[in-house]
Image (cartoon, coloured by chain):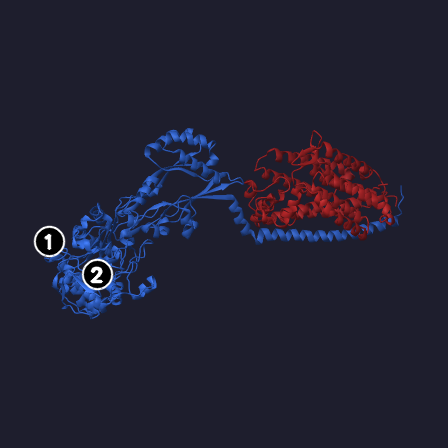
Chain colours: A red, B blue
Amino acid sequence: MLYNRSSFQSSFSLREKFFNLDLVLLFSILLLGIISIFAQFSSSGGIFDYYSKSHALRFSVFFLFFLGVSFTPIRFWHNSSFLLFLSLVGMLLFVKFYGVQSQGSRRWVNLFVINLQPSELMKISIILFLSNYYHKISEGDVNKIKYLLYPVLAIMAPFILVLTQPDLGTAILILLSGVVVTWLAGVKWKIFAYLSLAALIFAPIAISFLKPYQKSRILTFLNPDADPLGAGYQIIQSKIAIGSGGLFGKGFLNGSQAYLNFLPEKHTDFIFTLYSEEFGFLGSVLMVFLYSLITYRIIKIGTETRSIFGKLFCYGFANAFFIYVAVNMSMVLGLLPIVGAPLPILSYGGSSMLAIMFGLGIVMSCNVYKNNAIG
Amino acid sequence: MLSFNSSNIASKTRTIGRRMFLLNSIKAVVVMGIFVRLASLQISEVSKYRSLADKNRFRETKFAPPRGVIEDYFGNEIASNTRIYQLHITPENTPNISKLLTRLKSLINLSDRRITSIQKKIIKQKKWETTIISDNLTWSEFSRLNLFLHELEGAIPIVSVARIYKNDASAHAIGYVSEVSPRDMRNKKYLSKLNISGIAVGKTGLESTLDEDMLGSPGYLRYEVNAYGKKIKQVSIDNGKKGKTFRTTLDNEVQLFAAKSLENVSGAVCVMDIYNGDIISMVSSPSFNPNSFVHGINQNEWNGLLNNRDKPMINKAISGLYPPGSTIKTLTALSALENDVVNSRLTVRCKGYIDLHGERFHCWKKEGHGLVGMRTALKKSCDVYFYEVARRLGIDRLANTAEKFGLGKKVLQNYREEKAGTVPNTKWKIRELGKNWYLGETLHSGIGQGYFLSTPLQLTLMTAQIANGGFKLKPRILLHENDQVSNLQKYLDHKNSTPGNIMSTEDQIFNFGLQPLFRNQENINLVKDAMFAATNEVGGTSYRSRHKNKKFMFAGKTGSSQIKRFTEEQREAEVKQENISYLERDHAWFVAFAPVSNPRYAISVLVEHGGSGSSAAAPLAKNIIKKVLERHQGRSSYSNRKMENI
């Protein structure tokens, strides 16, 4: 078996690395990025303005970043995950007191080049951190109270920090991403049941801390027609836009709802609405297919990866990625309340795209270095 | 570094794989859910959301098309449209509204009060809706506006059309239009459907009843607007459909002549074709200027109309109720003959009064008419004779005949303001007043006083139905393309085309499907003959107003309806009508048909507080009859030409 490479070979030539790239995933991401540039262009009313320009620039830069992450050994990401997590918690604390304020919440830290939103990166970092954590722990220890303390603390700290920014949507996504990894690692149902029960008991107390606008969003979801010009306006207009798109859509740059400003936040949370209005049912199904394909390829890489860290991260990230897509689409389709969750890559937003590309890069890195030992 | 044994890793991998499989199944379900939702929104409910999106997208400005025109019989426009000059502003395009209004004040006639009301209105409505600053500018104001238009940002000069009435003579028959009121919106369903602010709608007369058809279908301008309501571009324009034009039976020239005849009195004139029921003329006096209402009447003019003693806003021809007075003696005589209560040879001695159960009933002639028969009684309008006839006839049979001849119910269906009047009988009195009928009231009713109330148009119809030989007539004021030639008209055409061919009454009725109002036509002829005598024989009540020219000779009956009974003292003192106060004088009536040789038209003239029919009403009727007969040739040839065209 000497002619066979060792499973624990640590260095590859660049050529080998390139062949280890998952090209289906790579081109799906590229295609999604190109569609996103067109969507942002349409969202700006058919001109290259600040939004569409900076989105195109960001995607180009972040795509290179993604490739860079892909070719960085997976071991590096494994080793630096704790540091990354800690520094993001630090940034969240920093944001709490010195963050840039916008529309009543402090979410951003001014990095001069961009206003970074640490909470977005936290969505990835929590998966990374927990994958690292469970990579080391033997299966027998997973359900011991002692070993549960860390994960609970690691999830609750960023959750509460982000929730109080306030940013309900991101906080919930961080919570979900963390919980899913924990569960995948083998933590028993029973423990989740106890924790949920505890959460349920504390929920009324937590709700009393919710801002009035957050409460009204939940109420609005339950009956959007009650206040058609207020908070329900967004859901109604979004449904009108999507519904009026029909089978084939109104055509590129012809979405009247978006063009005439009936759509709120059309660059960010409601970008899918605009896309769906212009490209109709067929275009929307294509988009759902593209996101499903990306999710599938991530899961496939996770399955092929031998290390527990890589597996947990890929699965955890696949689930998180899918949740972002599902939550955003369900939201604009009127199936969930408006919580403020961007659609990966398609939505305008630097931090969100950076986080997604970072996550995808690590997944790709898992594939490139799939035979590498982590240690 | 190899701290994990391979079985640990394998077991961990199995757990993770198993749990991931479960999550993937959930993902598949969620994807299906999104797929189904997309399909339901974009495929099943696409039309619902399309229309909602269009509702978002488009905003329509409706505007009224030109209103339908009302013509007289010969096609002359009585109510037509004219070009007017207006000034509109749209608040969203006006940077400074109060500054603009101040500037406008120096250019056009704009009162401070109007400015305040405009500003109030602008606050209430949407900023893209146009506000009318002035809806009827003079040409000089309009040209001045256009000259300074560059300084008046937001002001839009508009050339539009509005109603114009050629004269006041037909103001009552035609009615008038004015700006729609909240009450109109409530009462008229079609208006809420139209939903054009400030549109002129018919308020009275034909303008009111034909309003829906004359409004036409509105035009609209369709704009694409954005979410903030700002107009992006004009998408389409629809000019709407002009309202329907209506032709009436009125003769504009007769209208003008009749109005002129009534110039200095308060009253009404109605002229009717006795064969086809055409209303040739319907005039009420004094009249008003209907054009004043089109652009909003000013308070002074309105108060002047409301407080006028002679009530110019009321169409006396159909809404004025008066006791018919002696004109009803024709029906009293007819009813008695038809019911075989008396025969025409009945004579009564009139000594100026009769006493009945201790009450004295006076004849208008204090010294009495002596021995009179029916013809003379009608000719001289002897009250005592008709007291006797009425006493024998009874009120119920008289009422029956009166109703048959068109009293007590509306003549036309075209007027909301038309009144039905009253034909009293024993049942009516118990129902309305809760009292029994007294014989004395029968006597008063027999000479058209007491409870009887009728409109000038009703008495015209009554006279027309006597004049045409006693056949039921369906009056009309509107002509329609699909009007059938009336049976009476066919009968007339036959009579004219075969002179000398005398058909028995039974054959006439049978051949032409006529509806006789009589049992024996002789009785009708007897009344007609007596009316001839009243006008054309010495001693007749309207002898002084007769036409000597055979062509214009007419037969008529005078009447006066009492406002206030004379006291015994006044009667003894022989007080003349001219000497009592205006509002206590009797109303003067005259009903007639002409020409006597071959009757064609019936007329009634009412002069409020005119004193006596023979002196106040009959001379007016004489002139109008001449005018109508002079126009007859033109009218019938015009109608023949029309027939050929159809």
Query: In the rendered image, is residue B252 in sight?
Result: no
Describe the element under mark 1 as helix, strand or loop. Answer: loop
Report the Cα–Cα distance between label 2 and label 1.
31 Å
Q: Earlier in the sequence, mark 2 or mark 1?
A: 2
Judging by the rendered image, the residue that carries numbered circle 1 is B549
Residue under the image location 76 percent in, 53 percent down: B22
Q: Which mark is residue B32?
A: none
Instruction: Return the chain for callout 1.
Output: B
**Crowdedness of circle 2 by 10 Å Cα count: few (<14), some, many (20+)?**
many
Query: In the rendered image, is residue B18 in sight?
Result: yes
Q: Determine whether B548 is above or below B385 in the image.
A: above
Percent of width and height locating residue A285? 63, 49
Q: Nearer the viewer, residue B343 or B603?
A: B343
Query: Which of the 4 image quadrants contains residue B555?
Result: bottom left
Q: Nearer the viewer, residue B70 or A202?
A: A202
Give the residue type that dot 2 points to. Ile
Give the residue type that dot 1 points to. Asn
Quarter placement of the C terminus of chain A: top right
Percent of width and height locating residue B548? 10, 54
Describe the element under mark 2 as helix, strand or loop. Answer: loop
Query: Which of the 4 image quadrants contains residue B81?
Result: top left
Judging by the rendered image, the residue that carries numbered circle 2 is B447
Percent of width and height locating residue B540? 13, 57
In the image: residue B437, left or right of residue A330: left
Q: Nearer the viewer, mark 2 or mark 1?
A: 2
**Crowdedness of circle 1 by 10 Å Cα count: few (<14), some, many (20+)?**
few
Instruction: Return the chain for callout 2.
Output: B
Is there one chain holding both mark 2 and mark 1?
yes
Q: Nearer the viewer, residue A269 or B199?
A: B199
For the image shown, how many numbered marks are present on the structure? 2
Residue under the image location 40 percent in, 31 percent down: B104
